[in-house]
Amino acid sequence: MKLIFVIMTLALTLNAFAQDLTINGAEFGIGKFHRKDNKEHAYEANNAWKVYVLPEGVSLKEAYVQKNSETDYTIFFTNLQEFLEKIVEITTKTGKKVGIINLNAHGLPGGMWFPKDAKTRDSMECSSWRSAASNSDESNYSQYYSAVSKDEMLSFNSMSNSSRIPSFQCLTGVNEWAAIVAKVSAIKKVFSHDAQIHMLSCIVGMGTLGDAYTTGLAKILFETPDSQQIQTSIKFGLGDWSMPEGMGFWGFESDAQLDRDNEVYPIHRRDSEIMQKGSIRVAQANNGKIQSGLIKGEDFIYLGRDSRVVDYSSRPSVTKSMNLSLPASVRIPGTNTVIQVR
């Protein structure tokens, strides 16, 4: 009996040691939003966004690593390179593989709004991003709850079917990821065989540009594709105090719906009041090949492991329509920042 107890204890110990890591990432502006949101409506213990509350007094000049548990960390960062470097440091220190990355940032089709490296962060290109990141908690909080016009929605749709993201706008897309992964090549070795990356960001998976971004990142990051996947949202993302389960969805469905939502949203400041069904774009590694598909008609992108069925019949074809003209400018969703697209 004593031997059986010892064996069971050893098995449990080894299982705990082998548990994969969850890495939550956010640029500092997002951390400030959640800090203010948590003060307005205290996040309960099981709220998915609790790990994104930026502690008081943290320096904003370099990445800050917060240990939530033995297998769960949050990295607040100023650029992609330091985010990836901190992930490598954590895996080296713990001896564990990364099972899940949840990356929370403002986005546009095919890219996220944060610098790729320290040099870009400190350049004129990212002056608007630096300003937003250094703004008060109240500023980051209030701009999140902003109305979106129909013209803006149409601009995002047009951008999503273009051939590239705009350059020199502090956006990090496939090309920027490729350049930084080449510098931090050890990142390709940190993932477990069934790792998942959840991009908690507005419309980053929208259109042909979003599809190219999602599949492109999978090809860049997964060195030996097994059953890993990357998830992005086709619609706007919802993730405040009222969405404890994960990131919800919102988008244009009708003029009446848009008018109604834009009237109540900036006042009530409650994401769940306007939430919709949405589809999740997935780039999935399968037998060494990256496939693109959708998880359709869901309420949330989860911050935990996702085993929902992916429909691979829905990948958009990449045709000459990729050469659609870009809008002149767009406002980054959830911010007051307008960037030039062409």
Image (tube, helix red, strand yellow):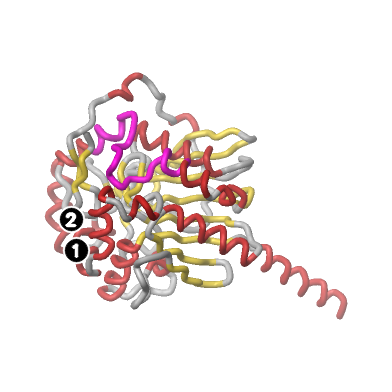
Return the residue at label 1: 142
The residue at the far top in this view is: 320
Q: CA distance from mark 2 to mark 1?
A: 7 Å
User: Quarter of the image containing the N terminus?
Assistant: bottom right
Q: Is residue 175 magenta?
A: yes
From the top left corner, tell me how far across and down residue 147 is, in percent.
Answer: 16, 52
What amino acid type should be assigned to the residue bearing mark 2? Ser
**Does the magenta run of residues contain 195?**
no
Local crowd size for mark 1, using a 10 Å CA cut-off: few (<14), some (14–19), many (≥20): some
Give the x, y percent position of residue 264: 15, 58
Residue 10's place in the image compared with 340, above or below, is: below
Q: Are marks 2 and 1 in contact (CB under 8 Å)?
A: yes
Q: Name the residue rendered at 43%, 59% in the picture.
A: 25
Q: Which residue is mark 2?
A: 146
Q: What amino acid does circle 1 point to?
A: Ser
Question: Image quadrant of residue 318?
Answer: top left
- Residue found at x 24% / y 32%: 158
Residue 280: x and y, percent?
41, 43
Residue stretch rendered in magenta on the structure: 156-178
Quarter of the figure with the C terminus: top left
